[in-house]
Image (cartoon, grey):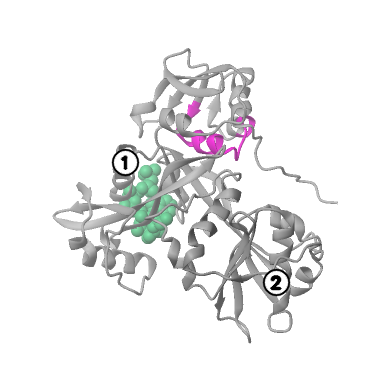
Amino acid sequence: MHIREYTDDDLDAVFRLRRLAFNAAERPERLVKPGTHGLVAELDGRVAGVLSIGAFAQFYGGAAIPMGGIGGVAVDGATRGRGVANALLDAALSTMREHGQPLSVLYATVPTLYRGRGWERAGVFEWVELPMDRLLSVPRPAELIPSRPACESDLTALHDCYLEVARTIDGMADRRPPRIELGKVLELDLVSVLPGPNGLRGYLTAKRESGGDMGRLKVFDLVGVDVEAQLNLLASLASWTGTLEAIDLRITDPATLNLLGGTPIRYSVWTSAWMLRVVDLPAAVAARGWPRPANAVVDLEIIDEHAPWHAGNQRIVAEDGVVRVEPGGTGAVRLHARALGPWFSGAQNTHALRRAGLLEGDPADAVVLDQLVGASGVPRLADFF
Ligand SMILES: CC(C)(COP(=O)(O)OP(=O)(O)OC[C@H]1O[C@@H](n2cnc3c(N)ncnc32)[C@H](O)[C@@H]1OP(=O)(O)O)[C@@H](O)C(=O)NCCC(=O)NCCS
């Protein structure tokens, strides 16, 4: 098997694979686009598998860390089960490391495949359905902020407004060009902005889609840097009463959910879990923001046969507000490759990782890992009353 970077000459072969795998209807004009590259696997001189790697970055602790977003993994139906996907993922790990991407994220239709290569569930992407009566029960804003349609000259301020909120939410993408084209947002049906004293206080982007009698309104971003901005944007959605029975809202800022006071215990949510893989632990640790770390040391043994560059004994050292990874140490806490993503994102604490068979060693040593990321996982209750 031969694995290489794809070029536009591979477009036909790749489209054939993706049409079979995903029922993709439209042949794209180009394969290699700014901010995206990819790999193909050749078997007996024919393209037998493909994946793409997008150049994203995710915020953790307020710092944007370059992240390879894997997508479009497809293997020829006639050559499945022969290790093509595994080989592509192994090559993708080295490629991302070479491209300075210490993290990798993907949305998996086949999680088993990715678990085998060290990706694990580490966060969610969610949409909620908001029936109009719930929107109408949102408190009225105390301050009326006049909104207006966005234009080309707002694009930078719009991105800055997004970043002001996104950098405070672990896992959010920084939407950097060229992978994300900022101007594309203006192609949406509704882009409304709330001007503020310095740039924008908030904005809303939405698209009309078919479905039901009058279609649907899909709100992609509802972003307000303060509570009044959010309440103004939610109030603007109430204007759809009469036309629509509900609005679909993508959760960009979890704070928005807190404002939907009329939301009862049961409501419709679509959740897609994303999987995270730490490709290069020392580089990922150096790039992350850490919430006021106290001086501490934790000795790790990393079990990771697919990323040998960071496998073995590694010591995490937090000193004078800086956290770094050094080779060596006693290996007191053993972390399997799949533990790295959920630990790094804060999605699971070390107790959960231990019970999942992904971490071993003295709990007193391991707790330093929880203290560093400042997260104990998604709060939960498993009792209903
Ligand atoms: C999923 C797909 C990419 C796998 O390709 P492949 O070359 O057959 O995979 P490999 O032979 O390298 O197998 C890799 C591992 O994944 C497992 N696997 C593969 N397909 C699987 C499936 N559908 N369900 C569960 N496990 C699967 C294999 O058992 C193997 O496990 P192992 O390493 O423990 O032996 C291929 O079946 C495909 O193109 N499917 C349609 C598109 C798709 O679903 N892509 C994934 C998008 S996220």
Is label 1 in a helix, a strand or a loop?
Answer: loop
Q: Is residue 191 magenta?
A: no
Q: Main secondary structure of the magenta part?
A: helix
Q: Position of residue 303 (x, y in %)?
A: 43, 27
Q: What residue did someone put label 2 on?
A: 236
Q: Is residue 343 magenta?
A: yes
Residue 103 placement (x, y as % from top left)? 43, 40
Q: Is residue 250 visible?
A: no
Say which residue appears at 21% left-offset and 57% top-offset: 7
In the shown orientation, is residue 13 left or right of residue 245? left
Q: Are marks 2 and 1 in contact (CB under 8 Å)?
A: no
Task: Please tell me which residue lies in front, 93 or 109.
Answer: 93
Image x and y of residue 348, in percent: 61, 37
In the rendered structure, which disc, 2 or 1, sits on the residue that comes first in sequence?
1
Q: Amino acid at mark 1?
A: His
Element at label 2: helix
> Who's the residue at 29% across and 55% down the image?
50
Q: Residue furthest right?
A: 385
Please state which of the two labelled residues, at mark 2 or mark 1, is closer to the viewer. 2
Location of residue 114 with respect to 47 vertically, above or below = above
Q: Residues within 10 Å of mark 1 (few under 14, many from 20)?
A: few
Q: Quadrant of residue 304?
A: top left
Amino acid at the residue labelled 2: Ser
Q: Say which of 16 and 218 sits in front.
A: 218
Residue at 29 percent across and 53 percent down: it is 37
- The image position of residue 299, as x and y in percent, is 51, 17
Q: Which residue is mark 1?
A: 99
Residue 42 located left or right of residue 177: left
Part of the protein shown in magenta: 335-352
